[in-house]
Image (spheres, grey):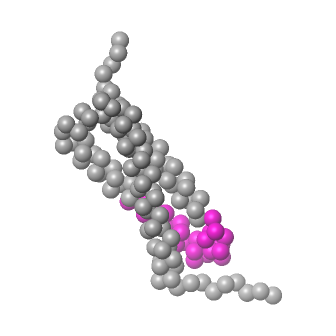
C-alpha cells in the first residue's frame, strides 16, 4: 500500500509558484507587446493619431497594468492545486493554464488595440 505524498508547506508551494510563473510573465508580456505593436503597425498611418494626445498613452499604461494584475490570477489555482492530491499532475499540466491565459489576454489586447488604433473615419 502506497501512501499519499505529504503536503508541501505553504512557503514551498509559494516558492514553486513564483519560480514557475514569474519567468513566464516575460513571455506573456512579450506576446501582448507583439499584438499591440502589430495592431499599431497594421493600422498605420491612422494609429499615429492615437498618440497625439496623452489619453491613449494613459489607456495603454492602465491596460498593461491590468493585464499583469490578471496574470496574477493564475496563482490562485496553482497554489490550491499544489496543495491537493493532484499536485504531480498539475505540475505537469499547468502550462495549459499559461497558454489559455496568454491566448485570452492576447485576444483582449487585440480588441482594445483595434479600438485605439483603427481608423475612425466612416466611409459612406
Q: Is residue 90 magenta?
A: yes
Q: Residue at x 55, y 72 (%)?
A: 80
Mark count: 0
16 vs 56: above or below: below
Q: Position of residue 42 (x, y in %)?
A: 39, 34
124 vs 54: above or below: above
Furthest residue in direction right, as rendered: 1
User: Quick one: 35 or 56, which is closer to the camera?
Assistant: 35
Image: magenta residue range: 69-93
91 sits left or right of 105 in the view: right
64 sits left or right of 25 in the view: left
Instruction: Classify residue 43 by image quadrant.
Output: top left
Q: Position of residue 71 (x, y in %)?
A: 43, 60
10 vs 37: above or below: below
Q: Residue at x 33, y 56 (%)?
A: 65
User: Quick one: 34 or 106, which is closer to the camera?
Assistant: 34
91 sits left or right of 47 in the view: right
Q: Quadrant of the C terminus?
A: top left
Q: Quadrant of the N terminus?
A: bottom right
Q: Answer yes or no: is residue 10 visible.
A: no
Furthest residue in direction left, as rendered: 53
Q: Position of residue 45 (x, y in %)?
A: 30, 30
Please identify the dominant SS of the magenta region.
helix
Q: Residue at x 51, y 49 (%)?
A: 103
User: Quick one: 14 or 22, which is closer to the camera?
Assistant: 22
Q: Is residue 51 magenta?
A: no
Q: Position of residue 15 (x, y in %)?
A: 47, 79
Q: Answer yes or no: is residue 12 visible.
A: yes
Q: Residue at x 45, y 51 (%)?
A: 31
Amino acid at each position: 500500500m502506497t501512501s499519499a505524498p505529504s503536503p508541501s508547506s505553504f512557503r514551498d508551494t509559494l516558492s514553486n509558484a513564483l519560480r514557475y510563473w514569474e519567468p513566464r510573465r516575460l513571455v506573456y508580456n512579450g506576446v501582448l507587446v507583439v499584438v499591440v505593436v502589430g495592431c499599431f503597425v497594421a493600422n498605420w498611418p491612422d494609429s499615429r493619431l492615437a498618440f497625439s494626445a496623452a489619453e491613449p498613452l494613459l489607456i495603454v499604461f492602465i491596460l498593461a497594468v491590468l493585464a499583469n494584475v490578471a496574470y496574477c490570477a493564475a496563482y490562485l489555482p496553482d497554489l490550491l492545486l499544489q496543495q491537493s492530491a493532484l499536485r504531480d499532475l498539475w505540475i505537469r499540466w499547468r502550462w495549459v493554464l499559461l497558454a489559455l491565459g496568454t491566448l485570452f489576454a492576447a485576444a483582449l489586447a487585440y480588441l482594445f488595440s483595434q479600438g485605439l488604433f483603427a481608423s475612425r473615419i466612416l466611409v459612406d
